[in-house]
Image (tube, grey):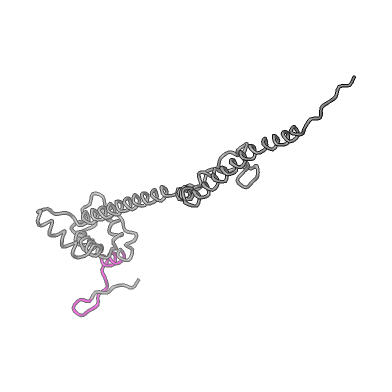
Amino acid sequence: MPHREIVVNGRKTPPSLVDLCVNTTIDNLRYLGDVGETDLYLLDRILPHCTLDQLMHIEKSSQGRDLSQVTDNLWKKFYEKQFGKEKTEEVVRRMVKSKRTFKWIQLYEAKLEYIAEQEKEAAARFKQRYEKIDARKQSRQVQICTKVPPSKNKRGFFGGSGPGYNVSNVKSNLMKKSKVDYLNSNEMKNRAAMKRMASQTQRNSGCSSSMMRPAQFKGKDSASTSKPLKPIGRRF
């Protein structure tokens, strides 16, 4: 790593040991954790070069050390960068109005928790809505037919003796209504009337034929008996 020279009164001077330490630390911020008792003026030169994750790691690692004198303004910049200038100004107005102050790292973490909670509630609502839609689809499904044991007296659906199906369950209300309408139609009534008339005519013709037959037989008998009988003479 090249040395950073300092210009004083137009003359270049080699960097001091402190400068070398600061520059080395800045180049290796990814390895920095607990800053311990490091002077604030040194941290003021080092920490502004941290990324958000690096600064958060240093804050959490430096237990018992308040770094807000150096990091509070840095956290405000991260807050504004991630959530916008308007949100940052709104937070400032609320703190002024309530006469209360909070560290910007606390405000940043609170904002992250609020967003996570909102996303969790939105996911729960979406899941509940999806379950309702799925339940509604399941309730609209119709079972077309039901498998039943084969009948002993009747043949199967396809004429065989294999397992049958309950065909009566397959008939829809529309088919039943069509059948009833057809049975009550004028055509079926006319057919029924013609059948009744034909059966009545057949019965009447049968009765007349049965009445004619005894008369014929009687005529033959009377004809045979109407012939004169010859007297039978006595034989002695």
Range of the magenta residues? 7-24
| Residue that protrudes farthest toward the right in the picture | 236
Residue 151, image x, y percentages:
60, 38
* Image side of residue 150 versus residue 222, left or right: left
Residue at the spot x=23%, y=49% of the render? 64
* Image side of residue 147 versus residue 61, left or right: right
Q: Nearer the viewer, residue 182 or 39?
A: 182
Does residue 92 belong to the magenta stretch? no
Residue at the spot x=28%, y=57% of the render? 56
Residue 140, image x, y percentages:
41, 49
Residue at the spot x=81%, y=30% of the render? 230
Does residue 13 belong to the magenta stretch? yes
| Residue that protrudes farthest toward the top in the picture | 236
Residue 188, image x, y percentages:
50, 49
Q: Quadrant of residue 103?
A: bottom left
Q: Quadrant of the N terminus?
A: bottom left
Instruction: Give the number of marks.
Output: 0
Q: Quadrant of the C terminus?
A: top right
Q: Nearer the viewer, residue 102 or 15?
A: 102
* Image side of residue 65 versus residue 123, left or right: left
Residue 14 lies, with reference to residue 166, above or below; the image says below
Residue at the spot x=33%, y=63% of the render? 28
